[in-house]
Image: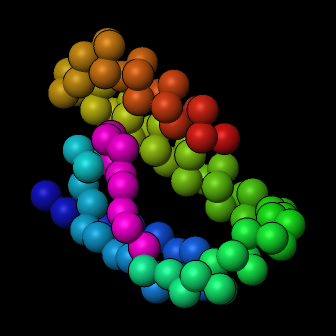
Amino acid sequence: MVKGILTLQKQGCKSYEMDVSDQILMNDIKADLECDPEAAQAAETRPQTTTAKQAEIIDATTEQRLNELKTLYDKGLISDKEYNAQRTRILNEL
């Protein structure tokens, strides 16, 4: 069942979108982005900054993902091992 759309964006690259569900979000997501080599290289040389608003969005998304993971665990849909592995993966992304 589709829960939403995941959009990956990188400066100098074409956006990538895919339909996602809880099951997909629990796994690593890999995508080959189509990038303009010169634009991508220029973007990599610029310092990366996170604004306060971006940090709030990241925190909200992380909280939502953790809550969804806990719901799956509480319903018995995933094991202790799966829950702990995914929880660790989400927290390591911070």
Q: Is residue 77 left or right of residue 58?
A: left
Q: Is 11 rendered above or below residue 63?
A: below
Quadrant placement of the N terminus? bottom left
Q: Is residue 26 magenta?
A: yes
Q: Give the dominant element type of the magenta stretch: helix, strand or loop.
A: loop
Q: Is 67 rendered above or below residue 16?
A: above
**Residue 47 occupies quadrant:** bottom right
Q: Is 90 rendered above or below residue 41?
A: above
Q: Is residue 88 left or right of residue 80?
A: right
Image coordinates for residue 45, horizontal then vertical, percent: 81, 70
**Residue closest to the eye, 27 or 20:** 27
Q: How many marks?
A: 0
Residue at the (36%, 63%) spot, across then down: 31
Image coordinates for residue 29, horizontal then vertical, percent: 36, 52
Q: Is residue 49 visible?
A: yes
**Residue closest to the eye, 92 or 68:** 92
Image coordinates for residue 51, horizontal then vertical, percent: 83, 66
**Residue closest to the eye, 71 or 15:** 15
Please identify the residue farthest to the left as the structure is shown. 1
Q: Is residue 3 visible?
A: no
Residue at the (81%, 64%) spot, across then down: 48
Q: Is residue 77 left or right of residue 13?
A: left
Quadrant placement of the C terminus? top right
Q: Is residue 57 left or right of residue 70?
A: right
Residue at the (31%, 41%) spot, across then down: 27
**Residue 44 occupies quadrant:** bottom right
Report the magenta residues as a range.
25-33
**Residue closest to the eye, 35 or 8:** 35
Q: Is residue 30 magenta?
A: yes
